[in-house]
Amino acid sequence: MDDTLRAKKTFGGLGYYKTPSYGLTKYPDEPLFKGIESFQKDHGLRKDGVMKPGGETANKLGKALGQQKSAQNMLGTLRPWQVQKINRLQARINELQEKIKRLREEINREADPNRRNVKLLSIGQLVGEIRKLEEEIKAVPYQERA
């Protein structure tokens, strides 16, 4: 199968590509570029609409597919809206993990113990938010669309 068709079907399965009215073609099209950009945005990547073999976007896509396959193996096929919701929640977790990483770097440079403590408290709050999001992800396969 052609790489472009494979990408369209893969992004479609993750809820990032909708087949246009003219049908599925082997040529890159605007909906594919927009889908790649949306995926990149949701996963904290540089939003350029480009996916190169072995690049950041392709690697994240592989991880997303692995997570989807893992969930499907446990619970059967997920609906596209469920995959989209999981992807949005995972993207938020990724953002929070980046914030924690930055705060840890700031703590290592901070001389004032009071400021260090404030940053440590912030990390604790972010970890709590990540745990809630992880619980939401676990619940998605059991949810009905509202």
Image (tube, rainbow, N blue to C red):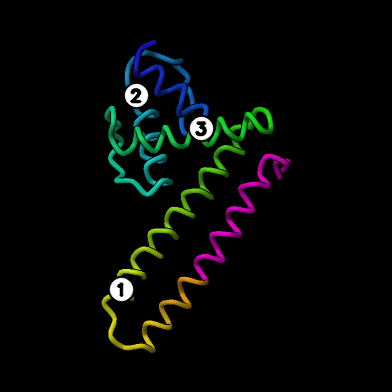
Q: Quadrant of the N terminus?
A: top left
Q: Earlier in the sequence, mark 3 or mark 2?
A: 3
Amino acid carrying mark 1 in the image: Glu
- Residue found at x 45% / y 60%: 96
Secondary element under disc 2, as helix, strand or loop, is loop
Q: Position of residue 56 (x, y in %)?
A: 31, 39
Which residue in the structure is indicated by mark 2?
29
Amino acid carrying mark 3 in the image: Leu
Q: Position of residue 111 (x, y in %)?
A: 28, 85
Which residue in the structure is indicated by mark 3?
14
Secondary element under disc 1, as helix, strand or loop, is helix
- Residue found at x 36% / y 88%: 113
Q: Quadrant of the C terminus?
A: top right
**Is residue 56 rendered to the left or right of residue 89?**
left
Q: Earlier in the sequence, mark 1 or mark 3?
A: 3
Q: 10 Å neighbourhood of mark 2: few (<14), some, or many (≥20)?
A: few
Q: 10 Å neighbourhood of mark 3: few (<14), some, or many (≥20)?
A: many
| Tag shown at residue 106 | 1
Mark 1 to mark 2 CA distance (whole Å): 43 Å
- Residue found at x 30% / y 74%: 108
Give the extent of the magenta segment.
125-146
Amino acid carrying mark 2 in the image: Asp
| Tag shown at residue 143 | none
Q: Position of residue 134 (x, y in %)?
A: 59, 53
